[in-house]
């Protein structure tokens, strides 16, 4: 259904090959803003994989994206 916040951090960590994820995740969150997603059976918010990819592309590549 989507990625949890920890899975998103792992996804972002791979690109710059860093363990210092807090500032990077904050920048990602600023780009993502308030966005749609789904809720796992555990109650955790999941962000759609496509959204994670396009917001990461904006963060790392400066690639423009559309917003919901």
Image (cartoon, grey):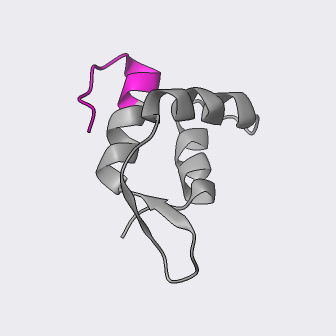
Q: Is residue 33 left or right of residue 21?
A: left
Image-quadrant location for residue 13 = top right
Find residue 20 and report its horizontal and vertical position in percent. Answer: 76, 34
In the rendered image, the vertical position of residue 43 relative to residue 18, given as above or below: below
Instruction: Give the left or right position of residue 3, taking residue 18 as reference.
Output: left
Quarter the N terminus occupies: bottom left
Quarter-wise, where is residue 37 in the image?
A: bottom left
User: Could you tell me which residue is drawn at 60 percent across and 51 percent down?
Assistant: 10
* Along the viewing direction, whichever of 18 and 5 lies nearer the viewer: 5
Write the residue at 35% across / 56% down.
48
Q: Picture coordinates of residue 3 (x, y %)?
A: 47, 61
Closer-to-camera residue (19/8):
8
In this view, which residue lies farthest toward the bottom? Answer: 41
Number of on-image labels: 0
Quarter of the picture containing the C terminus is top left
Magenta highlight range: 57-68
Q: What residue is rendered at 27% in x and 32% in y?
A: 67
Q: Does the magenta stretch include residue 62?
A: yes
Q: Where residue 55 sits: x, y (%)?
A: 39, 34
25 up-or-down from 30: above or below:
below
* View extreme (front): residue: 34
Relative horizontal placement of residue 6, taking residue 33 as reference (left or right): right
Q: In the displayed image of the protein, which residue is found farthest to the top?
A: 62
Residue 3 magenta-highlighted: no
Q: Where is residue 2 in the image (x, y as percent from the top left)?
A: 40, 64
Residue 23 occupies quadrant: top right
């Amino acid at each position: 259904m989507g990625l949890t916040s920890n899975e998103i951090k792992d996804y972002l960590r791979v690109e710059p090959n860093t363990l210092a994820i807090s500032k990077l995740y904050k920048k990602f969150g600023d780009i993502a803003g308030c966005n749609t997603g789904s809720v796992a059976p555990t109650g955790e918010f999941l962000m759609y994989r496509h959204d994670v990819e396009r917001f990461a592309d904006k963060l790392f590549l400066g690639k423009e994206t559309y917003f919901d």
